Amino acid sequence: MIGQLRSELLKQRSTQTALYLFLAMFGLVALAITLHVVTLGAGDLASRARQLEVFQVGSRAGMLFAGLAGAIAITAEIRYGTIRPTFLITPRRGPVIAAKLAISGLVGLVFGLLAEGLMVGDAAAAFAVRGIGNQLTSGDYLQLLAGGAAAAALWAAAGVGVGALVRNQVGALVGLCAWMFVIESTFESFLPSVGRLLPGGAGLALAGNSDELSAGVAALLLVLYAAVAAAGGWRATLRRDIA
Amino acid sequence: MAEQMLTVAGPGEPPPRQAVVRCRALTKRYGTLTAVDNVTFSLEPGTVTGVLGPNGAGKTTTLRLLLGLAEPTAGEALVFGRRYRELDQPARQVGAVLESTDFHPGRNGRDHLGALALAAGFPLARVEEVLEQVELTGAARRRVRTYSLGMRQRLGLAAALLGNPQLLILDEPANGLDPAGVRWLRLFLQKLAAQGRTVLVSSHVLAEVAQTVDQVLIIDRGHLLARGRLDELTGNGQTLEDVYLELTGGEVA
């Protein structure tokens, strides 16, 4: 199993995929924070609750890009055919998926930390430029970093599962983006009582961006989602023929 | 009739005990399409066998079934007496290349091999040895997207050789190679065979097969039509091409 983990880590390190994902995430966070801080009135940004809402962008970006990284970890192998040599070397496929879940979780954790860090830095700078007082407590920052990182790690594991189920790379990536930005925000707007329970909503609660759920319930829900997606992907990968 | 000269495949004959590869009544159906239909054969150690057949004949599917990438609908496909997935150390026993394009274009050759070596628990020094063996040491740090087709074929071979296996299974390794690449591959396979390894190689390049293998399996539309030693098949003055075209109908699909 150590060998599988090292193999998976080398696969992650030996392409530029993670770097490009990070740059895209960086761009998204910077754009979003600029738009928020420039367009919202100073009064709208004055309260701690409103500021935490602005910081949602960092948590959302961390979860989404972690999910994308997880999905790419398996769909890139299918897309480029390296799944064949991978399963020829390790024909019992379970350990391969387990290593992908573990290493993608780790990568997701890093994405979550970076996203929250970027967000905190960008927003603090933007608040300072506009002369808006920063209302966040050190406890808020701690929950953003720890909760955001944990949520992103779980999204990454779920991403591996979704990728293993969908298999088509474009389909998996578009599906995850649509989930985060279309489906979740639709629920959030029209059925918030359900939206807060979805993977994105639960992640926001875990990172402290919303108080719709307690952090404990949010963590439990996210673990459940990740476990279900991972189990589905695991089962599909063990049973399906490789073309 | 050609059949009289051939050992026509039949499930009746007992396979030799020491068979390295053994397929028994192997069948794979995809919906209504039967890709592999009741194929039975076995390969003894040290033989170099060519699997011949037109495109879509079932060659690749047979190899995928042998290698545990697909599950048979019926029958069994065994290597060293076991299903591939049940081998203790598959990478040390079997080396295989199914597609010459199975690389991440943005990963370099050394890291491609490194990821496979780590997964199998081989030391990374083994990567340098196989790079040397296929003459890719100089290109090891380049991304695979810059490799020629011949270099990709060799990188695939290097991966198959990581575990120094006794059985090599190669699907269309000569496909798309230029004459120098084909010659390199032929000499390389002959060298591996001379070391006593068993080689199973599929191809539709008959001239190439005739120079490399000592026995052939001819497959068409999922059926094993003939198997035998090359010198037996071509014994009555027929070329391999004559025999092949007679058996497979010879019409351009």
Image (cartoon, coloured by chain):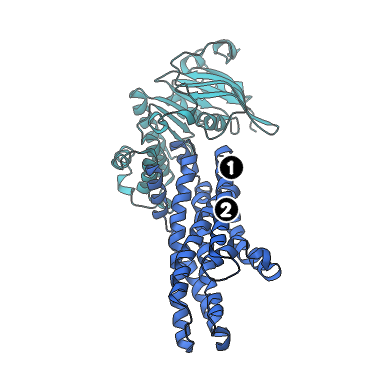
Where residue A81 appears, as percent x and y from the top left, is 50, 45
Q: Quadrant of residue B211?
A: top left
Colour assigned to chain B in the rendering is cyan
User: Mark 2 or mark 1, which is nearer to you?
Assistant: 2
Side of A9 relative to B226 (left or right)? left
Return the residue at label 2: A224
Q: What secondary structure is found at the residue carrying circle 2?
A: helix
Figure quadrant of the C terminus of chain A: top right
Vertical side of A94 occupied by A24: above or below: below
Give the residue at x 46% y 32%.
Answer: B170
Q: Give the secondary structure at mark 1.
A: helix
Is residue A190 something one can see in this rendering? Answer: yes
Any part of residue A82 in sight: no
Q: Amino acid at mark 1?
A: Ala
Labelled disc at residue A236: 1
Do the residues under discs 2 and 1 have CB atoms within 8 angstroms?
A: no
Same subunit under labels 2 and 1? yes
Q: Read off the chain for label 1.
A: A
The percent coordinates of residue A1 (x first, y second) are 40, 41
- Depth check, front residue: B233 or A237: A237
Tell me: residue A145, above or below residue B46: below
Q: Position of residue A230 (x, y in %)?
A: 55, 48
Q: Amino acid at mark 2?
A: Leu
Which quadrant of the figure has residue A202?
Answer: bottom right
Q: From the top left corner, tell me how far across and down residue A117 is, in percent.
A: 43, 71
Q: Which chain is blue?
A: A
